[in-house]
Amino acid sequence: MDIALTESQVMLRDMVRELASREIAPLAAQADREQEFPMRQFRALAAADLLGIPFPEEVGGMGGSTVDYVIALEEVCRACASTGVTMSVQTSLAASPIYRFGTQDQKKRYLEPLCRGERLGAYSLSEPGSGTDAAALACVAHRDGDDYVLTGTKVFVTNGFHADVYIVYATVDPALKHKGITAFIVEKGTPGFSFGKKEDKLGIRASSTYELLFKDCRVPAANRLGAEGEGFKIAMWTLDGGRIGISAQAIGIAQAALDACLRYTDERETFGKRLSDHQAIAFMLAEMATDIEAARLLCWRAASLKDAGKDHGEAASIAKLFASEMAMRTTTKAVQIHGGYGYTTDFPVERLMRDAKITEIYEGTSEAQRMVISRAELAAR
Ligand SMILES: Cc1cc2nc3c(=O)[nH]c(=O)nc-3n(C[C@H](O)[C@H](O)[C@H](O)COP(=O)(O)OP(=O)(O)OC[C@H]3O[C@@H](n4cnc5c(N)ncnc54)[C@H](O)[C@@H]3O)c2cc1C
């Protein structure tokens, strides 16, 4: 694998870095404090054509690759992890399955506006009784003429209330277990579809996380994504790609923590010298940089496998597992390096540590990644 960035990838990275430091990073602390959805930041990404990076131009995308996408996403998350997850859900979880499994009509109506950032997307698989065990979902979809009628409760939906287009997973027959799960594209405002509780979270506090309520909600059969019973496959394929994005998010958060430490250790003095001149501190910086680089290579490897059309499920899980646990190690060290000040909101590292934690939980917990990786390794014996 060629691990050097191309000239155009360097240009993309530098462009997104500049945009994120100008229009996103300055808003991150306040957005976190006030739990303010990053709509302005989302619009800035849309204006720069960054919401459909890995999709062809004819469907409204940038015509780039998954590697291009994770390079850009890392820079956005380095500035603000809440804005980053908004971008990641839009591209990885809402647009991708429509691109891969949608009809021409669905691509025209939903994929193009998602790529252009004219509409905001969401992915709704989790339920009160099913998270890791996603196949146990209970939301039902009964066929009635030209419609399906959806009833059930979904939880933890990122972009929640603010989204316009939701990929919702429901079962046409619970007895069929995962073989009954079917995917639907549901528009906000559809009668019978409403919002429940908004989660009050530890981190990514500017991202909105909502409960969705479906009560006799009629969704046209034309909005079924893929075939009846194909939903579980669509959900898992989508998460394989999504996990590559979450590894990029973890790397961006960790890089922001290292950035903060490089600044602080150059300014703060103890025992008559700069913190960076104490070897114990300098070695922590070295460990952080090494950890981040290792995670970045795993992320790019998984992304390039996806671009090559190869099986990337295990590689995505490896990248996510390593990057998310690395982000927790790195941000915890960053708070330690800042001493008491790191524990306050005067510095960004406490927010980064809170933001890092979610990368070990959503789109499959670290335990779920270990299940995927160990199963793949055992199957290859
Ligand atoms: C902020 C946030 C945003 C989210 N966004 C979305 C979204 O947009 N769309 C969506 O559909 N979902 C979303 N989720 C849901 C998320 O994907 C789930 O929370 C996650 O998959 C874990 O499911 P759970 O919370 O039900 O935990 P559970 O499945 O109940 O697991 C609890 C614990 O047990 C462990 N565990 C479970 N089963 C096993 C096992 N077999 N072996 C070993 N350990 C096990 C888990 O790893 C975890 O540590 C979001 C969650 C949060 C917090």
Image (tube, grey):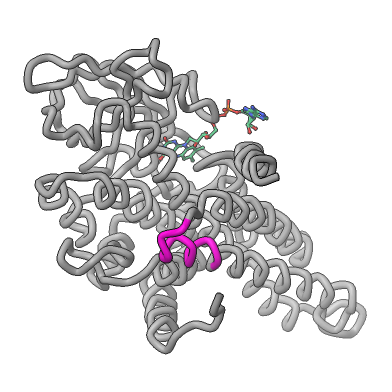
Name the image quarter holding the C terminus.
Answer: top right
- On screen, residue 270 versus residue 156, left or right, reads right
**Count of all numbered marks drawn on residues in the image:** 0
Residues rendered magenta in the picture:
301-310
Whole-percent x, y for residue 260 in the image: 64, 72
Query: Residue reaching furthest front?
Result: 381
Classify residue 102 by image quadrant: top left
Q: Residue at x 45, y 33 (%)?
A: 199
Is residue 3 within the magenta segment?
A: no
Q: Residue at x 52, y 39 (%)?
A: 201
- On screen, residue 13 versus residue 194, left or right, reads right
Query: Residue reaching furthest bottom?
Result: 7
Whole-percent x, y for residue 371 in the image: 64, 37
Ligand 1 in which quarter: top right
Asked whether the viewer can see residue 34, the reply is: no
Whole-percent x, y for residue 183 in the image: 28, 32
For the stretch drawn in magenta, the main secondary structure is: helix
